[in-house]
Amino acid sequence: MADEKKSVLKNIITEVGLSPEAVMTEVKQKKGKLFIGIPKETLFQEKRVALTPESVATLVANGNKVVIESNAGKNSFFHDTDYSEAGAEMTHNTEQVYQADIIVKVAPPTDAEINMMKLHQIIISPIHLPTLKREYIEKLMFKKVTAIAFEYIKDDAHSYPIVRAMSEIAGSTALLLASEYLSNTGKGKGVLLGGITGVPPAKVVIIGAGVVGEFASRTALGLGAEIYVFDNNIYKLIRLQNNIGRRVFTSVINPEILMRELQEADVAVGAIHSGEGRTPVIVTDEMVSKMKAGSVILDVSIDQGGIFETSHVTNHDDPVFKKYDVIHYCVPNIASRVSRTASSALSSILATIIQRAGDMGGIERLMIYDEDARHGSYIYKGHLTNKHLAERFSMKYTDLNLVFTAGM
Protein backbone atom coordinates (compact mmCIF):
# COMPACT_ATOMS: atom_id res chain seq x y z
CA MET A 1 0.00 0.00 0.00
CA ALA A 2 2.85 2.40 0.88
CA ASP A 3 4.59 1.66 -2.45
CA GLU A 4 1.33 2.26 -4.32
CA LYS A 5 0.81 5.59 -2.54
CA LYS A 6 4.37 6.66 -3.32
CA SER A 7 3.87 5.75 -6.96
CA VAL A 8 0.71 7.88 -7.15
CA LEU A 9 2.55 10.86 -5.68
CA LYS A 10 5.39 10.50 -8.17
CA ASN A 11 2.91 10.40 -11.03
CA ILE A 12 1.29 13.62 -9.80
CA ILE A 13 4.68 15.32 -9.48
CA THR A 14 5.74 14.18 -12.95
CA GLU A 15 2.46 15.42 -14.38
CA VAL A 16 2.91 18.96 -13.03
CA GLY A 17 6.55 19.07 -14.04
CA LEU A 18 8.07 19.52 -10.59
CA SER A 19 10.95 17.54 -9.20
CA PRO A 20 11.26 17.69 -5.43
CA GLU A 21 14.26 15.38 -5.56
CA ALA A 22 16.09 18.01 -7.59
CA VAL A 23 14.93 20.74 -5.26
CA MET A 24 16.12 18.84 -2.22
CA THR A 25 19.55 18.31 -3.78
CA GLU A 26 19.73 21.97 -4.70
CA VAL A 27 18.90 23.31 -1.26
CA LYS A 28 21.27 21.07 0.64
CA GLN A 29 23.83 23.79 0.27
CA LYS A 30 25.71 25.86 2.77
CA LYS A 31 24.45 29.23 3.86
CA GLY A 32 25.02 31.65 1.00
CA LYS A 33 24.37 35.23 0.01
CA LEU A 34 21.00 36.37 -1.22
CA PHE A 35 20.74 38.97 -3.99
CA ILE A 36 17.78 41.23 -3.20
CA GLY A 37 16.34 43.99 -5.37
CA ILE A 38 14.06 46.83 -4.20
CA PRO A 39 12.53 48.78 -7.13
CA LYS A 40 10.87 52.16 -6.81
CA GLU A 41 7.11 51.66 -6.64
CA THR A 42 5.27 52.89 -9.72
CA LEU A 43 1.74 51.99 -8.65
CA PHE A 44 -0.46 55.05 -8.32
CA GLN A 45 -0.29 56.54 -4.80
CA GLU A 46 1.90 53.83 -3.28
CA LYS A 47 4.27 55.65 -0.94
CA ARG A 48 5.67 52.76 1.11
CA VAL A 49 8.98 50.97 0.62
CA ALA A 50 9.65 47.30 1.41
CA LEU A 51 12.91 47.69 3.35
CA THR A 52 14.15 50.57 5.48
CA PRO A 53 17.85 51.52 5.69
CA GLU A 54 18.11 49.86 9.11
CA SER A 55 16.87 46.53 7.72
CA VAL A 56 19.16 46.84 4.71
CA ALA A 57 22.13 47.37 7.03
CA THR A 58 21.26 44.17 8.90
CA LEU A 59 20.90 42.13 5.70
CA VAL A 60 24.16 43.45 4.25
CA ALA A 61 25.99 42.81 7.52
CA ASN A 62 24.89 39.17 7.24
CA GLY A 63 26.52 38.80 3.83
CA ASN A 64 23.57 39.55 1.55
CA LYS A 65 23.61 41.89 -1.44
CA VAL A 66 20.90 44.54 -1.77
CA VAL A 67 20.36 46.78 -4.81
CA ILE A 68 17.86 49.63 -4.55
CA GLU A 69 16.48 51.92 -7.20
CA SER A 70 17.11 55.60 -6.55
CA ASN A 71 14.28 57.39 -4.69
CA ALA A 72 12.59 54.10 -3.75
CA GLY A 73 12.20 55.34 -0.18
CA LYS A 74 11.67 59.03 -0.92
CA ASN A 75 7.92 59.08 -0.19
CA SER A 76 8.56 57.52 3.21
CA PHE A 77 11.35 60.05 3.88
CA PHE A 78 14.16 57.49 3.55
CA HIS A 79 16.85 59.00 1.34
CA ASP A 80 19.33 57.43 -1.07
CA THR A 81 22.22 58.45 1.19
CA ASP A 82 20.58 56.51 4.06
CA TYR A 83 20.55 53.37 1.94
CA SER A 84 24.05 53.76 0.52
CA GLU A 85 25.44 54.29 4.02
CA ALA A 86 23.62 51.10 5.05
CA GLY A 87 25.57 49.18 2.40
CA ALA A 88 23.04 49.01 -0.44
CA GLU A 89 24.01 49.45 -4.07
CA MET A 90 22.06 52.34 -5.58
CA THR A 91 20.99 52.53 -9.22
CA HIS A 92 18.86 54.75 -11.45
CA ASN A 93 18.30 51.81 -13.80
CA THR A 94 15.13 49.83 -12.99
CA GLU A 95 16.22 46.93 -15.18
CA GLN A 96 19.39 46.59 -13.10
CA VAL A 97 17.25 46.06 -9.99
CA TYR A 98 15.44 43.25 -11.80
CA GLN A 99 18.71 41.37 -12.22
CA ALA A 100 18.43 40.44 -8.53
CA ASP A 101 17.37 36.91 -7.64
CA ILE A 102 14.72 38.11 -5.18
CA ILE A 103 12.51 41.13 -5.81
CA VAL A 104 10.67 42.59 -2.82
CA LYS A 105 7.85 45.06 -3.43
CA VAL A 106 5.08 46.78 -1.49
CA ALA A 107 2.72 46.80 -4.46
CA PRO A 108 1.94 43.97 -6.89
CA PRO A 109 4.22 43.99 -9.96
CA THR A 110 2.81 45.83 -12.95
CA ASP A 111 2.77 44.38 -16.46
CA ALA A 112 5.86 46.44 -17.32
CA GLU A 113 7.65 45.11 -14.25
CA ILE A 114 6.72 41.52 -15.09
CA ASN A 115 8.28 42.05 -18.50
CA MET A 116 11.54 43.03 -16.79
CA MET A 117 11.61 39.88 -14.65
CA LYS A 118 14.04 37.13 -15.50
CA LEU A 119 13.18 33.44 -15.61
CA HIS A 120 12.91 31.65 -12.27
CA GLN A 121 12.99 34.88 -10.29
CA ILE A 122 11.46 35.08 -6.81
CA ILE A 123 8.97 37.89 -6.22
CA ILE A 124 7.67 38.81 -2.75
CA SER A 125 4.81 41.29 -2.90
CA PRO A 126 1.11 41.59 -2.07
CA ILE A 127 -1.62 40.28 -4.36
CA HIS A 128 -4.71 42.46 -4.84
CA LEU A 129 -7.53 40.00 -5.43
CA PRO A 130 -10.27 42.44 -6.54
CA THR A 131 -8.27 43.65 -9.53
CA LEU A 132 -6.54 40.34 -10.36
CA LYS A 133 -7.04 38.90 -13.84
CA ARG A 134 -6.22 35.56 -15.40
CA GLU A 135 -3.84 37.16 -17.93
CA TYR A 136 -1.79 38.60 -15.07
CA ILE A 137 -1.35 35.18 -13.46
CA GLU A 138 -0.47 33.63 -16.82
CA LYS A 139 2.27 36.21 -17.42
CA LEU A 140 3.89 35.38 -14.09
CA MET A 141 3.59 31.65 -14.79
CA PHE A 142 5.20 32.11 -18.21
CA LYS A 143 8.24 33.62 -16.48
CA LYS A 144 8.50 30.46 -14.32
CA VAL A 145 8.72 32.66 -11.25
CA THR A 146 8.08 31.78 -7.64
CA ALA A 147 5.59 34.37 -6.38
CA ILE A 148 4.86 34.86 -2.68
CA ALA A 149 1.99 37.03 -1.46
CA PHE A 150 3.30 38.48 1.76
CA GLU A 151 -0.14 39.06 3.23
CA TYR A 152 -0.63 35.26 3.29
CA ILE A 153 2.70 34.42 4.97
CA LYS A 154 2.14 33.04 8.46
CA ASP A 155 4.32 33.20 11.56
CA ASP A 156 5.04 30.66 14.31
CA ALA A 157 1.68 31.46 15.91
CA HIS A 158 -0.03 30.68 12.57
CA SER A 159 -1.24 34.26 12.30
CA TYR A 160 -0.49 36.71 9.49
CA PRO A 161 2.18 39.14 10.78
CA ILE A 162 2.12 41.58 7.85
CA VAL A 163 -1.67 41.60 7.76
CA ARG A 164 -1.66 42.25 11.50
CA ALA A 165 0.76 45.19 11.24
CA MET A 166 -1.14 46.80 8.37
CA SER A 167 -4.43 46.01 10.10
CA GLU A 168 -3.37 47.84 13.24
CA ILE A 169 -2.64 50.89 11.09
CA ALA A 170 -5.84 50.52 9.05
CA GLY A 171 -8.05 50.03 12.10
CA SER A 172 -6.67 53.09 13.87
CA THR A 173 -6.73 55.23 10.72
CA ALA A 174 -10.26 54.19 9.69
CA LEU A 175 -11.90 55.90 12.64
CA LEU A 176 -9.87 59.06 12.17
CA LEU A 177 -11.11 59.10 8.58
CA ALA A 178 -14.67 58.44 9.72
CA SER A 179 -14.47 61.40 12.08
CA GLU A 180 -13.39 63.60 9.17
CA TYR A 181 -16.09 62.39 6.77
CA LEU A 182 -18.79 62.91 9.39
CA SER A 183 -17.78 66.57 9.61
CA ASN A 184 -19.08 69.30 7.34
CA THR A 185 -15.64 69.79 5.76
CA GLY A 186 -15.70 66.11 4.82
CA LYS A 187 -19.13 66.63 3.21
CA GLY A 188 -20.74 64.78 6.10
CA LYS A 189 -23.69 65.75 8.22
CA GLY A 190 -21.66 67.61 10.84
CA VAL A 191 -21.50 65.02 13.60
CA LEU A 192 -18.77 64.92 16.26
CA LEU A 193 -17.80 61.28 16.69
CA GLY A 194 -17.52 61.47 20.47
CA GLY A 195 -20.40 63.84 21.18
CA ILE A 196 -20.27 66.30 24.10
CA THR A 197 -22.03 66.79 27.41
CA GLY A 198 -25.75 66.58 26.77
CA VAL A 199 -25.29 65.36 23.18
CA PRO A 200 -25.00 61.60 22.56
CA PRO A 201 -21.92 60.24 20.74
CA ALA A 202 -21.96 58.77 17.26
CA LYS A 203 -22.78 55.10 16.87
CA VAL A 204 -20.13 52.93 15.21
CA VAL A 205 -20.82 49.42 13.90
CA ILE A 206 -17.70 47.32 13.36
CA ILE A 207 -18.06 44.07 11.42
CA GLY A 208 -15.13 41.84 12.29
CA ALA A 209 -13.44 41.36 15.66
CA GLY A 210 -9.94 40.67 14.35
CA VAL A 211 -7.01 43.06 14.49
CA VAL A 212 -8.66 45.77 12.35
CA GLY A 213 -11.81 45.51 14.45
CA GLU A 214 -9.87 45.68 17.70
CA PHE A 215 -7.86 48.75 16.76
CA ALA A 216 -10.89 50.43 15.22
CA SER A 217 -12.69 49.77 18.52
CA ARG A 218 -9.80 51.19 20.55
CA THR A 219 -9.72 54.36 18.46
CA ALA A 220 -13.51 54.77 18.45
CA LEU A 221 -13.65 54.38 22.22
CA GLY A 222 -10.74 56.77 22.62
CA LEU A 223 -12.67 59.35 20.60
CA GLY A 224 -15.75 58.78 22.74
CA ALA A 225 -17.96 56.92 20.26
CA GLU A 226 -20.47 54.17 21.06
CA ILE A 227 -19.44 50.89 19.40
CA TYR A 228 -21.18 47.69 18.33
CA VAL A 229 -19.00 44.79 17.20
CA PHE A 230 -20.15 41.82 15.09
CA ASP A 231 -18.29 38.60 14.32
CA ASN A 232 -19.23 34.94 13.95
CA ASN A 233 -16.16 33.89 15.94
CA ILE A 234 -17.08 34.00 19.63
CA TYR A 235 -13.43 33.63 20.66
CA LYS A 236 -12.53 36.78 18.71
CA LEU A 237 -15.34 38.71 20.38
CA ILE A 238 -14.15 37.59 23.82
CA ARG A 239 -10.54 38.44 22.95
CA LEU A 240 -11.51 41.90 21.70
CA GLN A 241 -13.36 42.72 24.91
CA ASN A 242 -10.47 41.45 27.03
CA ASN A 243 -7.89 43.36 25.00
CA ILE A 244 -9.69 46.70 25.03
CA GLY A 245 -10.43 46.28 28.72
CA ARG A 246 -14.11 47.14 28.82
CA ARG A 247 -17.51 45.65 28.08
CA VAL A 248 -19.01 46.67 24.73
CA PHE A 249 -21.94 45.46 22.65
CA THR A 250 -20.95 42.30 20.77
CA SER A 251 -22.98 39.91 18.64
CA VAL A 252 -22.67 37.13 16.14
CA ILE A 253 -23.57 38.22 12.61
CA ASN A 254 -27.32 37.81 12.70
CA PRO A 255 -28.82 39.61 9.65
CA GLU A 256 -31.79 40.98 11.58
CA ILE A 257 -29.72 42.33 14.48
CA LEU A 258 -27.05 43.68 12.13
CA MET A 259 -29.67 45.43 10.00
CA ARG A 260 -31.24 47.02 13.05
CA GLU A 261 -27.92 48.43 14.26
CA LEU A 262 -26.84 49.57 10.78
CA GLN A 263 -30.06 51.57 10.39
CA GLU A 264 -29.08 53.60 13.44
CA ALA A 265 -25.33 53.73 12.76
CA ASP A 266 -23.35 56.85 11.90
CA VAL A 267 -20.29 54.80 10.90
CA ALA A 268 -19.94 51.21 9.64
CA VAL A 269 -16.52 49.58 9.35
CA GLY A 270 -15.87 46.42 7.30
CA ALA A 271 -13.02 44.63 9.09
CA ILE A 272 -13.03 40.99 8.03
CA HIS A 273 -9.95 39.24 6.61
CA SER A 274 -10.06 36.04 4.59
CA GLY A 275 -7.14 33.65 4.96
CA GLU A 276 -7.74 32.07 1.55
CA GLY A 277 -9.31 34.44 -0.93
CA ARG A 278 -12.21 36.86 -1.26
CA THR A 279 -14.03 38.08 1.82
CA PRO A 280 -17.74 37.23 1.96
CA VAL A 281 -20.35 39.90 1.22
CA ILE A 282 -22.10 40.44 4.53
CA VAL A 283 -23.90 43.76 4.11
CA THR A 284 -26.26 43.66 1.14
CA ASP A 285 -27.31 46.47 -1.15
CA GLU A 286 -30.72 46.52 0.54
CA MET A 287 -29.15 46.87 4.00
CA VAL A 288 -27.05 49.84 2.86
CA SER A 289 -30.12 51.48 1.33
CA LYS A 290 -31.75 51.55 4.78
CA MET A 291 -28.82 53.28 6.50
CA LYS A 292 -29.10 56.92 7.56
CA ALA A 293 -28.37 59.59 4.98
CA GLY A 294 -24.91 61.03 5.58
CA SER A 295 -23.61 57.98 7.42
CA VAL A 296 -20.14 56.68 6.54
CA ILE A 297 -18.96 53.24 5.40
CA LEU A 298 -15.27 52.37 5.58
CA ASP A 299 -14.72 49.03 3.86
CA VAL A 300 -11.23 48.12 5.10
CA SER A 301 -11.77 44.66 3.59
CA ILE A 302 -11.85 46.14 0.07
CA ASP A 303 -8.38 44.77 -0.74
CA GLN A 304 -9.99 41.33 -0.62
CA GLY A 305 -13.18 42.33 -2.41
CA GLY A 306 -15.04 44.07 0.41
CA ILE A 307 -17.89 42.98 2.69
CA PHE A 308 -20.36 45.65 1.55
CA GLU A 309 -22.19 44.80 -1.66
CA THR A 310 -22.15 48.49 -2.63
CA SER A 311 -18.35 48.84 -2.35
CA HIS A 312 -15.90 49.33 -5.19
CA VAL A 313 -12.20 50.23 -5.12
CA THR A 314 -11.32 53.94 -4.80
CA ASN A 315 -8.01 55.77 -4.37
CA HIS A 316 -6.44 58.46 -2.19
CA ASP A 317 -7.15 61.26 -4.71
CA ASP A 318 -10.82 60.31 -5.08
CA PRO A 319 -11.40 58.20 -1.95
CA VAL A 320 -15.17 58.37 -1.49
CA PHE A 321 -18.41 58.00 -3.38
CA LYS A 322 -22.05 58.09 -2.35
CA LYS A 323 -24.73 55.48 -2.84
CA TYR A 324 -28.15 55.83 -1.22
CA ASP A 325 -26.67 59.06 0.22
CA VAL A 326 -24.24 56.95 2.28
CA ILE A 327 -20.56 57.95 2.02
CA HIS A 328 -18.31 55.01 1.04
CA TYR A 329 -14.54 55.03 1.66
CA CYS A 330 -12.97 52.06 -0.16
CA VAL A 331 -9.23 52.72 -0.55
CA PRO A 332 -7.31 49.40 -0.43
CA ASN A 333 -3.94 50.73 0.79
CA ILE A 334 -5.00 52.83 3.78
CA ALA A 335 -1.60 52.22 5.38
CA SER A 336 0.04 54.26 2.60
CA ARG A 337 -1.42 57.37 4.24
CA VAL A 338 1.21 56.91 6.97
CA SER A 339 3.94 55.56 4.76
CA ARG A 340 6.92 55.88 7.09
CA THR A 341 5.23 54.02 9.94
CA ALA A 342 3.87 51.40 7.54
CA SER A 343 7.26 50.93 5.83
CA SER A 344 9.00 50.41 9.15
CA ALA A 345 6.42 47.82 10.17
CA LEU A 346 6.68 45.98 6.84
CA SER A 347 10.45 46.10 6.80
CA SER A 348 10.94 44.59 10.23
CA ILE A 349 8.86 41.56 9.26
CA LEU A 350 10.15 41.10 5.70
CA ALA A 351 13.80 41.50 6.69
CA THR A 352 13.41 38.80 9.34
CA ILE A 353 11.87 36.39 6.82
CA ILE A 354 14.55 37.14 4.21
CA GLN A 355 17.40 36.75 6.67
CA ARG A 356 15.95 33.47 7.89
CA ALA A 357 15.83 32.27 4.30
CA GLY A 358 19.47 33.28 3.87
CA ASP A 359 20.46 31.37 6.99
CA MET A 360 18.70 28.28 5.64
CA GLY A 361 20.28 28.50 2.19
CA GLY A 362 17.61 30.30 0.18
CA ILE A 363 13.91 31.09 -0.22
CA GLU A 364 13.18 27.64 -1.68
CA ARG A 365 14.62 25.86 1.31
CA LEU A 366 12.60 28.09 3.63
CA MET A 367 9.44 27.14 1.73
CA ILE A 368 10.25 23.43 1.83
CA TYR A 369 10.79 23.26 5.57
CA ASP A 370 8.51 26.06 6.77
CA GLU A 371 4.83 25.47 6.07
CA ASP A 372 3.91 28.92 7.38
CA ALA A 373 6.19 30.69 4.90
CA ARG A 374 5.03 28.31 2.16
CA HIS A 375 1.44 29.35 2.78
CA GLY A 376 2.16 32.67 1.05
CA SER A 377 3.12 31.03 -2.26
CA TYR A 378 0.63 31.33 -5.12
CA ILE A 379 3.02 30.44 -7.95
CA TYR A 380 5.97 28.05 -7.63
CA LYS A 381 8.37 27.78 -10.57
CA GLY A 382 5.58 28.69 -12.95
CA HIS A 383 2.91 26.42 -11.42
CA LEU A 384 -0.21 27.83 -9.78
CA THR A 385 -0.26 26.74 -6.13
CA ASN A 386 -3.19 28.73 -4.75
CA LYS A 387 -6.39 26.69 -4.81
CA HIS A 388 -8.67 29.72 -4.61
CA LEU A 389 -7.07 31.33 -7.67
CA ALA A 390 -7.14 28.03 -9.57
CA GLU A 391 -10.88 27.70 -8.93
CA ARG A 392 -11.56 31.35 -9.70
CA PHE A 393 -9.85 31.25 -13.10
CA SER A 394 -10.49 27.56 -13.90
CA MET A 395 -6.77 26.86 -14.04
CA LYS A 396 -4.70 23.81 -13.13
CA TYR A 397 -3.79 23.63 -9.45
CA THR A 398 -0.60 22.20 -7.95
CA ASP A 399 -0.70 21.24 -4.27
CA LEU A 400 2.69 22.47 -3.05
CA ASN A 401 2.33 20.72 0.30
CA LEU A 402 1.88 17.40 -1.52
CA VAL A 403 4.90 18.03 -3.76
CA PHE A 404 7.24 18.93 -0.92
CA THR A 405 5.97 16.15 1.34
CA ALA A 406 6.59 13.61 -1.41
CA GLY A 407 10.14 14.82 -1.83
CA MET A 408 11.09 14.52 1.85
Image (cartoon, grey):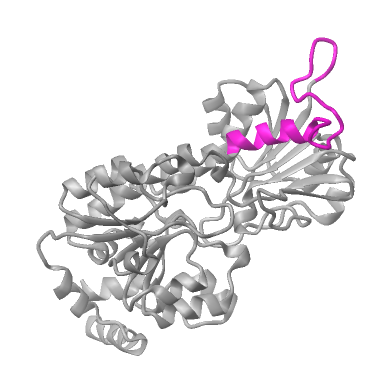
Q: Identify which residue is drawn at 65% across, 50% down.
A: 331
- Which picture quadrant has residue 358? bottom left
Q: Position of residue 233 (x, y in %)?
A: 59, 44
The x and y percentages for residue 388 are 53, 69
Q: Is residue 237 visible?
A: no
The quadrant of the image that shows the C terminus is bottom left
Q: Main secondary structure of the magenta part?
A: loop
Q: Which residues are magenta?
A: 171-200
| In this view, 405 is above or below 33 | below
Left or right of residue 325, residue 172 in this image: left
Magenta stretch holds residue 277: no
175 within the magenta span: yes
In this rendered view, identify the residue nearer to me: 204 or 328: 328
Front residue of this view, candidates 89 and 115: 89
Toward the left, the furthest residue is: 30
Quadrant occupied by the N terminus: bottom left
Can you give x and y, in whole percent of width and height, for residue 149 in the image?
A: 44, 61
Which residue lies at the image location 67% right of the left edge and 55% below the top edge?
306
Asked if one can make out residue 163 in the rendered structure from this viewpoint, the answer is: yes
Above or below, 334 against 31 in this view is above
Residue at screen point 47% across, 79% down: 139
- Could you tell me how many numbered marks the image carries? 0
Looking at the rendering, which quadrant does residue 220 occupy?
A: top right
Question: In the image, 180: left or right of 337?
Answer: right
Residue at the far top in the pictured view:
197
In the image, taking residue 211 as reference, residue 249 lies left or right, namely right
In the rendered image, residue 96, in percent from the top left (x then y), is placed at 32, 67
Q: Nearer the viewer, residue 25 or 295?
A: 295
Left or right for 30, reference 13: left
- Residue drawn at (40%, 74%), measured in percent from left and top? 116
